[in-house]
Image (tube, rainbow, N blue to C red):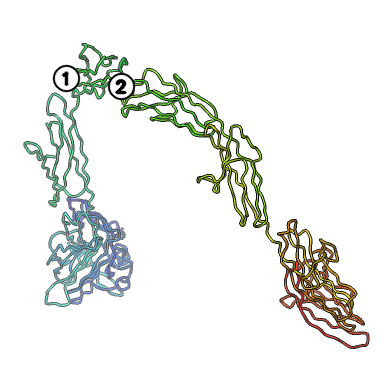
Amino acid sequence: MKRCLFFIYALLFFNAHTSAQFTPIPVSGFSQDVIAEGGPSPLATTTMEIDALTPSNKVMYSVSFASFASITAGLPDNGTIVSGSDTYQLASYTGNNALFVKRNEIFELTVSTPAPFAKIRLLAFSAEQASTINIGLGFSDGSYSPYLSNYVLSDWFNGGTNIVAQGFGRVTRTATGPYTADGATTNNPRLYYIEITLSCTDRSKSLQKVRINNVSTSSNAPFPNAVIMGVSGIAFTQTITPTITASDCNGPNGSIALNVTGSTGPFTYSWNTNPIQTTATASASPPGNYNCTITDAAGCTRNFNGTITLNNNATITATATPASICAGSSTQLGITNGIGSLTDYTWTPGNLSGSAQAVTPATTTTYIVTATNALGCSAASQVTVQVQNKPAAPLLNAVSVCSGSNATLAVTNPSPSFTYVWYAAATGGTSLQNGNSYTVNNVTAAATYYVEAVSSAGCVSDTRTAVQLNVDPIPAAAQIANATVCPGADITLQVQNVNTATVTYRWFPTQTGGAPVAIGYSFTLIGVSAPSTWYVEGFSTAGCVSPTRTPVQITLIPRLAMPVVTVSAISFSSLTFSWPAVTGATGYLISTNGGSSFVAPSSGSAGLTHTVSGLPGNTTVTVLVKATGVNACETSLNAGPVSGTTLSTREIFVPNAFTPNGDGKNDVVKVFGNYIASIDFRIFNQWGQLIFQSTALATGWDGKHKGVLQPVGVYAYTLKVTRQDGTVVAKKGSINLIH
């Protein structure tokens, strides 16, 4: 029931304003809670008192608090205050809801969403007498403008003008009741508005800050206090909507009517008419461009530009399609842009009637069309038809080219005024190309082409001129085999597909360009000392050249690589020397006398081993080995000397290299010696990993570990031999694995 009474009473204490509509602007920066929002203790629901001089310890209160305290009136629970058409919004009662600016203090409120405003109002009051304040505005671009200086803000009791709300009561800020509403039955307390009209420059900026400076000089320091409760504003969103009425041919009866919204009125208008019109509508105006200066209530101006067009006027544009014709051709006369319900079309010369006419002038002619409409407006227009002469047929010469070449056909008497169009047919067909010449790529057969002349006006010669394209055959590319030769020897190169009847052969040191070094189907090189490549081409009596020069590579026969010789087996009476096969070798020669003479190895001329037998113990043999090929110049340099010594009766031998390549020669490395009872033979890789072990004299290493052939390299071994007399011999060494 008490809430209902409050809302009835609220109609009395919230004053009405009928000016522009102000709406709430969300802000932050409130510093104190001065409204008791719920019961029963205002001391518990606020942070400070408003009046404290006496001290009276007074604060405002909400309808909810009034309900708890069994009193009347109070501020609306939702914090919304409506004054006439304007609305103000108080901050939440549960937190800081007032900016409390004491004497000599400066505080700012921050706009939550910066935007342009034409006017703003601060919902405010003073406590402990009227306050004197300065107010300035800050904007998003960083600028700041002072607006109110030494503004007197009325006390909330018995204050002056600009009242927004009053009679809502105040209550003593104490811990317990009962509470008596102070002023609830009078016009006190009061909330006032402070109105600020933004300058023409500032209203286009986004408002960001509201700065309040309490500059009061009252003797009852530190009072008075300025209290800001909310901010409302009128957004600056000015738009101009024109309604334009065209004028017609009967006179100046056009108009422009402006509807201005946003900003603040009333608005004044000044048109650039003669005489000047000062209303929102410029009337009785002829066609043309118009400007209006619009001034709002704040004195801010804005310009509008608009155009009044001529309606229902008789306008016409004559056309000829095409406007340029060749002699003997026709064109279609017509009209475009005919405005104003035109009738009664007349063309001259010829006194022709109707909106369209086909004509065939013999020379360039200007045609004039006239028309009228129902309003009595008339219009006329003219168009000129250009008549162009046809060009003469072009002249050309026949062309002969080698088959596969490109042929260029050219007009012999070209004119810069004409375009030449090429065809594959005497009449009709699709054009091939435009230009003074036409190139046919990769010509393989004779053909006839045709060309016509076209003027800049599009006139075509009466006939197309034919031109014959003839084709001469080209020689086939020369066939010749590459050759090899021993260094310093002579060699003769010869074409294999000779056609001496119609073709001459030319020899070059380069694939393209240059001068020939010889002419004929053969070419002899004397004392070849380096590899080289030569080129030969066919040249016909018609001047046609084979499509490519055939390359002939001269390769020098290289000397074979030297064999890699190792001692693969040693006994008490024999030595065996081995070597892997040399790429390209057809045989081998070996010398045991320092190179004085060479013979075939004991394993045959193509063998890869040589065994010297019947030697005494502890005898050394030194060999030289060279590889031979098909040509004597391929013989390698001597490999070696490589020496081996037969075993003495008690010597133990392990070869230092082997070739486990599966050719049955030197594929296994093992221990050699006499009078051996047992062995422990171990082989290690470069990381010290044991990869082979044997205790049988006849069992050697085949170069594999776990079935995988090991890489080329050096492998270490340890050997423990127990002879038949019980003595023990230990050896260490290395073995080269060669593939």
Check the picture and name the quadrant holding the C terminus: bottom right
Q: Quadrant of residue 205?
A: bottom left
Which residue is situated farthest in the top direction here?
A: 351
Circle on res. 522? none
Residue reaching furthest left?
Answer: 275
Q: Residue at x 24, y 55 (%)?
A: 116
Amino acid identity at mark 1: Ser
Label 1 crowd (10 A; few <14 / some 14-19 / many >=20):
some
Residue 731 versus residue 691 in the image, above or below? below
**Residue bearing the label numbered 1:** 378
Please state which amino acid type lies under the numbered disc 2: Pro
- The x and y percentages for residue 653 are 84, 79
Q: Secondary structure at mark 1?
A: strand
Tell me where residue 565 sits by quadrant: bottom right
Q: Position of residue 118 (x, y in %)?
A: 19, 54
Residue with the mark numbered 2? 322
Is residue 421 rendered to the left or right of residue 45? Answer: right
Q: CA distance from mark 2 to mark 1?
A: 26 Å
Number of the front mark, 2 or 1: 2
